[in-house]
Amino acid sequence: MGGRFGRWMADHWPVAVAAGVLGYLLLPVVVVAGLSFNRPSSRLSYDFHEFTLDNWRDPCGSAGMCEAVVRSVQIGFVATVVSTVLGTLLAFALVRHRFRGRTVVNLLVLAPMATPEVVLGTSLLALLVAAGVPQGFWTVVVAHVMFCVSFVVVTVRARLSGMDTRLEEAALDLYASEWQAFRRVTLPLVLPGIVAAALLAFSLSFDDFVITNFNSGTTVTFPMYVWGASQRGIPPQVNVVGTAMFAVALLMLLVVRVREREPAASK
C-alpha cells in the first residue's frame, strides 16, 4: 500500500502540491462560510456554538452594516469603471505604441503596486489637506482609482502581449476598417483580460482599509465597519457578507469561463 501511494505521489506530485496550496488558500474561506451559520455564545466568542440560519435570514441584523456594504459596493463600482477604462487605454498605449518616456511610464505604473499602502494613504491625505478638499465618498473613489489602475494595466498588458497581432492584420487585409477590426477581433480577444482586471480592481477596492481609513472622513465602508465592530464584538452577519461576496465572485468567474469555452464547443 505504501509503495503504491509512493508511486502515485511520484507521478502526480505537482497535482498534490497544487491541491495542498489551494486547500491552504481556501481554508479561511471555508471557516468564514461555516461561521456564517453559527450562533456564537457571546459577541466576543468565535467558537462554533450552535447551527442557525438566522444570520442568512437577517443579514442586516447589525445597525449600519448593510449601509457600509452598499457604500463599499458603490465605491468599488465607480472605482472599477474608471480604473478599468484608464488602465485599458494605458495598456494599449504601452504595448502597441512606441513613444518618448515609455520606460518612465512603465516605472510609474508599477510604483503604486510597490509602495506601501500607508505611504499612499498619508501622501494622498497630505495632498487633499493642502488643497483644501473635504474628505468623503469621492476622495475614497480617487484613492482607489489611484492604486487600481496599476493592477488593471498589468493584467490587460499581459493579455495584449500574448495576443497574435496577425489576426488583426488579417482582418484589415479583408477590407475591415480599423474600428471593425478592433470591435470584431481585438476586443473579443482582450475582453477576458479586461474582465479579469475589472474583477481584481473591484475586489481590491472593496477590500481596502488602510488607504480608505486615511481619506474617508466620515464615510464608513465595510472594512472600516468590521474594524470598528471588532472592538466590541464582530456580528456573525459579517461572515454572511464575506461568504456571499466570495460566492458572487466565483459565480462570475465561472460564467466568464463558460462563455470562453462556448465558441470552441460550437466549432
Image: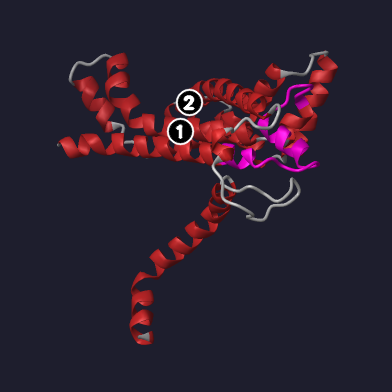
Magenta segment: does it hold 216?
Answer: yes
Check disc 2 and report the residue beneath it.
Answer: 88
Q: Residue 6 versus residue 104: which sits nearer the camera?
A: 6
Magenta segment: does it hold 225?
Answer: yes
In this view of the protein, can residue 104 be seen by the observer? no
Say few, some or many: other residues with alpha carbon within 10 Å of mark 1 (under 14 / 14 to 19 / 20 or more): many
Q: Quadrant of residue 82?
A: top right
Check disc 1 and report the residue beneath it.
Answer: 156
CA gap, disc 2 to disc 1? 6 Å
Q: Position of residue 15 (x, y in %)?
A: 39, 64
Q: At label 2, which amino acid type do we have? A: Thr
User: What numbered label is drawn on residue 142?
Assistant: none
The C terminus lies in quadrant? top left
Q: Position of residue 120 (x, y in %)?
A: 74, 33
Q: Who's the residue at 47% across and 35% down the image?
A: 248
Q: At label 1, which amino acid type do we have? A: Val
Q: Quadrant of residue 53?
A: top right
Q: Who's the residue at 57% across and 20% down the image?
A: 78
Q: Which residues are magenta?
A: 215-242
Q: Who's the residue at 70% across and 26% down the image?
A: 64
Eyeballing the image, is 35 above or below 64?
below
SS at badge 1: helix
Q: Who's the residue at 37% across and 80% down the image?
A: 5
Q: Residue 245 versus residue 99: which sits nearer the camera?
A: 245
Q: Position of residue 95 (x, y in %)?
A: 45, 31
Contact, mark 2 vs mark 1 (Cβ under 8 Å)? yes
Q: Is residue 226 left or right of residue 52?
A: right
The N terminus lies in quadrant? bottom left
